[in-house]
Image (tube, coloured by chain):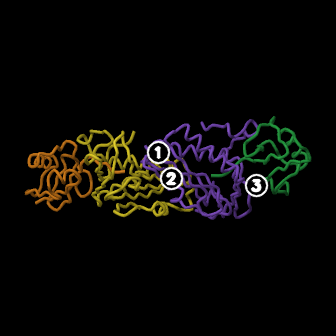
Chain colours: A yellow, B purple, C green, D orange
Amino acid sequence: MYKITSQPIAIEEVTAKVVRPEAGAIVNFIGTVREFTKGKRTLSLQYEAYPEMAEKQLRKIGDEIKERWPDAVTAITHRTGKLAISDIAVVIAVSTPHRKDAYQANEYAIERIKQIVPIWKKEQWEDGEEWIGDQLQKTAYSDGKPGEVKPS
Amino acid sequence: MYKITSQPIAIEEVTAKVVRPEAGAIVNFIGTVREFTKGKRTLSLQYEAYPEMAEKQLRKIGDEIKERWPDAVTAITHRTGKLAISDIAVVIAVSTPHRKDAYQANEYAIERIKQIVPIWKKEQWEDGEEWIGDQLQKTAYSDGKPGEVKPS
Amino acid sequence: MIHVQCFAHLKEQTGQDTITIEQSSLSVADLLAELSARFSIETDSLMVAINEEYASPEDIVSEGDRVALIPPVSGG
Amino acid sequence: MIHVQCFAHLKEQTGQDTITIEQSSLSVADLLAELSARFSIETDSLMVAINEEYASPEDIVSEGDRVALIPPVSGG
């Protein structure tokens, strides 16, 4: 259910993992490579992961969701390697009996990915490149484990 | 972008309509046929639409989203005919530059579909069948046009 | 003559896909009253669409309009 | 000996995928201090993972553990 891959992600494949008779709603989040961020043009992105730990942390997010939304089933696939504009970086699929929970649990998953999953992106611009860190503008890393940070 | 079809819906196809360089987030809502509702077992569903008007109302929902979330692009496909458990009844795809808007606009779309789009479902149970109406428990139909009902 | 499309349970209750009204023009309220009398259907929860837009009780339905009865919807 | 995996810009800054520490056991705080001295890298924002779990400064890293430096993440 939790996968890091260097191959293109098929939305249908991730979604199929959470389909079940009890579910009436599935919400997908699909993160794609955006061309402009604050006016700056991105040419491509490079994602690097610590795969063993990243899959473990994704599973932890699924467990956290299970605690908060017991009826939810979650599947997450994140891609690594070089991605072009509009390529899919991540697909999160959450199924629930009723739709409110699917939206909420899905949004929780993407927030947590940005906090605790060891994946890094390097932006390639027209005039250079840079590894992006701390995109949540949190500088609390030295104060504790990110695993303990709960979204507000 | 707005379609009523009697054919199975491909998630990737609806999603592809909203992919664009400005978007970093796509949220899908996928409505599937749930087996149990309040303890009662559904065997299958039959959806009937007034197709010309349904597509017009779907487009209206897209316009409403555009007003509220100017950066959002929306595509919606709803299926008609006989559906089995876990078959997809509707796919809503919304893309935005930033993810919060995609979740909100998507949820707005499904709420509005249940208010103003002329599509009806007939539930087939083990002991009978029935056309479902007024599933939002609103009895205000005679008080005004559903087009004027705004979600709270 | 005005042709009124029926959907869902209305099709079963009236036994028709399309009901024909022998008038060239009438209000939505009068249309519903006539249908209620002819088919003994509950019209309180029915909306009328004229040319694929929801209409108000005082709106006028005329020959040539595309008219439909819209029971409470249940899509999604 | 302890092997410490590096990712992202750390790989470029240290010039290594894996850093070797010539000790059999030390605290996470001491590990970061040593790396800061050896490679003049900013360690304030670095987390350390031991066996794929985030560790606290007082946790002990021992020979045989899978150890990694985790800069602020930017996936999703």
Q: Amino acid at mark 3?
A: Ala
Q: Quadrant of residue A10?
A: bottom left
Task: Tell me the CA gap for discs 2 and 1.
Answer: 16 Å
For this view, does C41 lie left or right of residue A56? Answer: right
Give the answer, above or below, for where A104 lies relative to D51: above
Asked if both marks, 3 and 2, belong to the same chain, the answer given is no
Disc 3 element = helix
Q: Amino acid at mark 2?
A: Val
Task: Tell me the CA gap for discs 3 and 2.
Answer: 29 Å
Q: Which residue is mark 3?
A: C8
Neighbor class of circle 3 (other Cα within 10 Å; few <14, some 14-19, many 20+) is many
Image quarter of the N terminus of chain D: bottom left
Task: Tell me the CA gap for discs 3 and 1.
Answer: 36 Å
* Residue B101: image location, x then y, percent: 48, 42
Q: Quadrant of residue A148?
A: top left
Label 3 with label 2: CB-CB less than 8 Å: no
Q: Which residue is mark 2?
A: A27
Asked if both marks, 2 and 1, belong to the same chain, the answer given is no
**Foreground of the two, A102 or B52:** B52
**Foreground of the two, A74 or A41:** A41
For this view, does A10 lie left or right of residue D11? Answer: right
Q: At 56% from the left edge and 59% from the top edge, which residue is drawn?
A: A22
* Residue C17: image location, x then y, percent: 82, 56
Asked if both marks, 3 and 1, belong to the same chain, the answer given is no
Q: Amino acid at mark 1?
A: Thr
* Residue A127: image location, x then y, percent: 26, 46
Q: Which residue is mark 1?
A: B96
Label 3 with label 1: CB-CB less than 8 Å: no
Q: At 36% from the left edge and 39% from the top edge, which residue is drawn?
A: A39
Q: At 39% from the left edge and 46% from the top edge, which residue is drawn?
A: A111
**Foreground of the two, A126 or A12:** A126
Give the answer, above or below, for where A54 lies relative to C50: below
